[in-house]
Amino acid sequence: MRVLCVIPAYWPAFQLGGPIFSVHNLNKALVKKDVEVNVYTTNAGLPRTVPINRETIVDGVRITYFTFTRFFEYLGTTGWQFSLPMTVALRRNLGLFDVIYIVAIWNYPVAIAAYYCRRHKKPYIISPRGLLYPYATGRKSWKKWPYYQLITRKVLQEAAAIHYTTGDESEKCHLPLGLKNKAIVVPNGIDLYEFKDLPEKERLRQRYPVLKGKKVILFLGRINWKKGLDILVKAYSLLAKERSDVHLLIVGGDEAGYLEKVKRWVKRYGIEQCVTFAGMLTGKEKIEAYTGSDIFVLASYSENFGIAVVEAMACGLPVIISNQVGIHEEISRFEAGMVIDTSAQQLAKGMESLLDNPQLREKMGENGKRLANERFRLDMIVDDMMRMYGDIVSSVKMAM
């Protein structure tokens, strides 16, 4: 089977979000199953660091990073991402592939790939990755609604299937948009081998001496509006007023200058001395952040999955997430953490409760490891994806 993955930005453009990790991990795993995977993407977030407009191989995946023109910035930080070289490649090469997997919604690569798929009668799957959630589409709807009516609605309606990463995302997006095509739920997966030999807890404190003797609350993810950092900073300020044994560690890359907002909130609440901004961490340093912390928090306003939540659980770290994070039902069912509303008061109470109850932290940490192993193992997820691709290709052949 030959799969073409079209995505506006790709590995290693880490600062542009979770799909950068999860989609590449999936593609690597597919290659190991003898699926030929090609990726058409742009060099967004990767100026001068990748070969452009020609194929290169990364972890067995055939990737072409196309140049693009940056305009219509009101559509996003990288604009609409119009790419003439990608357009030419799609027109020439689309017939070589069995199925097209398109990630995202509001970008030119998505629109042009879907257009050529319809023109050449190639089956395509759309994976919106949370971009169709009501909270996400409701923000700046003045620009999204016209675009949806003109372009996105047809892209979605004509897809062979829509791939959602959680049941929550499917429930809140598919029927409410009136979509009649197939909704398929396959979660993101992580390679548990990366979490096999975990570093000692003290490694993090050696790296950041300010954490010695403290209980660490960890946020790890993109620094942007939807991650609920305003909730976390306010909740932590309430906690810090009552106790001096806690420290907040914020890990992640800035998006559109949002980090400065977060730092202003920290200063306004007078908690600069007990908050550390670590920037983006990857590889061993990221794992050390998980294993050296005591609680992981993600109080998002809108989150289709939450790959960092699964990584934290794989490290045995208890989690507190909002009920707007797509995997909140699984977290509750497995008792792998706490699920709260998007409320600073609730979050502060939850953090205090966990900090004061080491037995509960240990229990939730163990349950989280079990959940990661039973539901989000990459080798299991890739088999589900291969079945999805196979079913789509077979149904198209039967219809011919």
Image (tube, helix red, strand yellow):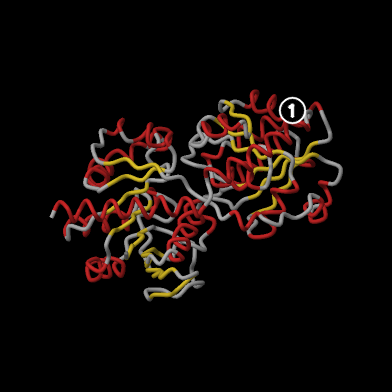
Rendered view: 346 above or below 133: above
Placement of the N terminus among the 4 image quadrants:
bottom left
Residue at the far right: name it.
213
Q: Which residue: 74% across, 44% down?
A: 293
* Residue 21: percent from left, percent from top: 51, 56
SS at mark 1 in the image: helix
Q: Is residue 115 left or right of residue 235?
A: left
192 and 220: which is toward the camera: 192
Name the residue: 62% across, 34% down.
Answer: 336
Give neighbour class at mark 1: few <14, some 14-19, many 20+ (Cα, 10 Å): some
Q: Please state which of residues 292 and 254 is positioned toward the viewer in this rendering.
A: 292
Question: How many numbered discs sit on the rendered protein?
Answer: 1
Residue projecting furthest to the left = 400
Relative to the observer, which residue lies in front, 318 or 42? 318
Q: What residue is rendered at 68% in x and 54% in y?
A: 287
Residue 319 or 184: which is nearer the viewer?
184
Spot occupied by residue 271 in the image (x, y as percentages of width and height): 75, 37
Give the amino acid type for the residue marked by disc 1 in the picture.
Glu
- Whole-percent x, y for residue 340 in the image: 59, 27
**Residue depicted at 74% across the width and 28% down the height:** 352
Give the percent coordinates (x, y) of residue 249: 71, 45
Identify the image quadrant of the C terminus.
bottom left
Indicate left or right for 107 with 231 as reference. Answer: left
Left or right of 163? Residue 342 is right
Tag 1 residue: 352
Which picture quadrant has residue 78? Answer: bottom left
